Amino acid sequence: MSHAAGHRLPSFFDPLSDGVVALRRFTEDDIPTLAACLQDPEIPRWTRVPTPYAEQDAREYLAGGEEAWQAGEEAGLAIVEARSGELVGAVGLVYIEWEDERAEIGYWVAARARRAGVATRAVRLLARWAFAELGLFRLEILPDAENQASLAVARACGFREEGVLRANTLIKGRRGDNVVFSLLASDPAALELLGRGDEPPGKPAAGGAVTGQASRRPRR
Ligand SMILES: CC(C)(COP(=O)(O)OP(=O)(O)OC[C@H]1O[C@@H](n2cnc3c(N)ncnc32)[C@H](O)[C@@H]1OP(=O)(O)O)[C@@H](O)C(=O)NCCC(=O)NCCS
C-alpha cells in the first residue's frame, strides 16, 4: 500500500470479518437503517450524533465520512452481522494523527444488538487493521467516565486505563469527564490481535462503496 502524506487510507477497503461481525464501508443503502438505529437516545447521549435524527442527517454523515476518508482524517465503518449482512452499528478511527501514528476509536451499536459482544469484536477487528495495515502505533478510546458500557468495551479489548480528562467534553449541555484508554501495538493484547494469539480475524469477500463515519468523538 502506498500513501501520500495525509492521504494514507486505502481507496479500496476490503471488508474485515471474524465470522460473526464484519466491518465494511457504508453505502447509500444504509441510510434508512442508520436513521432508524440512531433514534435510540442512548447514542446521542454519549456522542455528537444529533438528536432528533433524520435520514438527511444520515446522508450528511455519509458525505462527511467520505470527505474525511479521502482526507485521511477518519475511517468510519459499518458494523454488520457477518451472516445476514444486517447493519448493527458503526466503528471508526477518528482524529487520525499520522505523524504520531495515533488515532482514537469511536463506536455505537444498535440497541437490539447490544450485550452480544458486537462492539468488542468490531473494535478488535478495527484495531488489528489499524496496526497491521495502517501502521498506527497507539489507539485510544475516551469513554465518558459514566458510560459503563463503553468503559467495559475498552477493558474487554485489552486497552489500558491511563487517567481522566476532567470536564473534557460538553455534549448536549452536559460536561463530561473522559477516561483515557490506550492500546499500543507492542501491548500483549495487540500482539494477540496481530496473530500471535488464538483468535485472528479472517477476511471475507470484497465489497463496499461509499463511506461513512463512526460516532463522532470530541477532540481533546
Ligand atoms: C457502548 C456500546 C457500543 C457497547 O456495545 P455492545 O455491543 O453492547 O458491547 P459488548 O457486547 O461488546 O460488550 C462489551 C463489554 O461491555 C459490557 N457491557 C455492555 N453493555 C454494558 C452496560 N450497559 N453496562 C455494563 N457493562 C456493559 C459487556 O458485558 C462486555 O463486558 P465483558 O466482555 O466483560 O462481558 C453500546 O452500549 C452503545 O452503542 N452505547 C451508546 C453509544 C456509546 O456509548 N458509544 C460509545 C461512546 S465512547
Image (cartoon, helix red, strand yellow):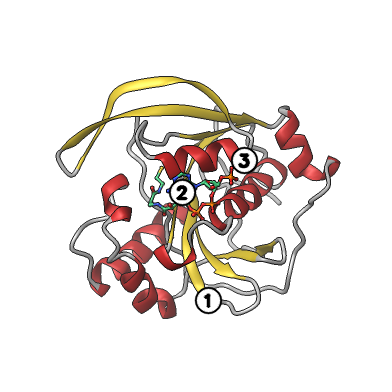
Residue at 53 percent across and 24 percent down: it is 161
Residue 40 horizontal/vertical position (percent): 30, 62
User: Which numbered disc flags the more N-terminal residue, 3 or 2?
Assistant: 2
- Identify the mark at residue 86; answer none if there is no mark: 1
Q: CA distance from mark 1 to mark 2?
A: 23 Å
Q: Amino acid at mark 2?
A: Glu
Labels 1, 2: front one: 1
Q: Amino acid at mark 3?
A: Cys
Q: Is residue 87 left or right of residue 121?
A: left
Q: Is residue 54 left or right of residue 135?
A: left
User: Which numbered disc flags the more N-terminal residue, 1 or 3?
Assistant: 1
Above or below — where is 61 with respect to 148?
below
Labels 3, 2: front one: 3
Residue at 23 percent across and 56 percent down: it is 50
Q: Secondary structure at mark 2?
A: loop
Marks 1 & 2, CB-CB < 8 Å contact: no
Residue 13 horizontal/vertical position (percent): 62, 63
* Residue 197 in sight here: yes
Residue 167 horizontal/vertical position (percent): 26, 24
Marks 3 & 2, CB-CB < 8 Å contact: no
User: Which numbered disc flags the more N-terminal residue, 1 or 2?
Assistant: 2
Q: Quadrant of residue 37?
A: bottom left
- Identify the mark at residue 74; answer none if there is no mark: 2
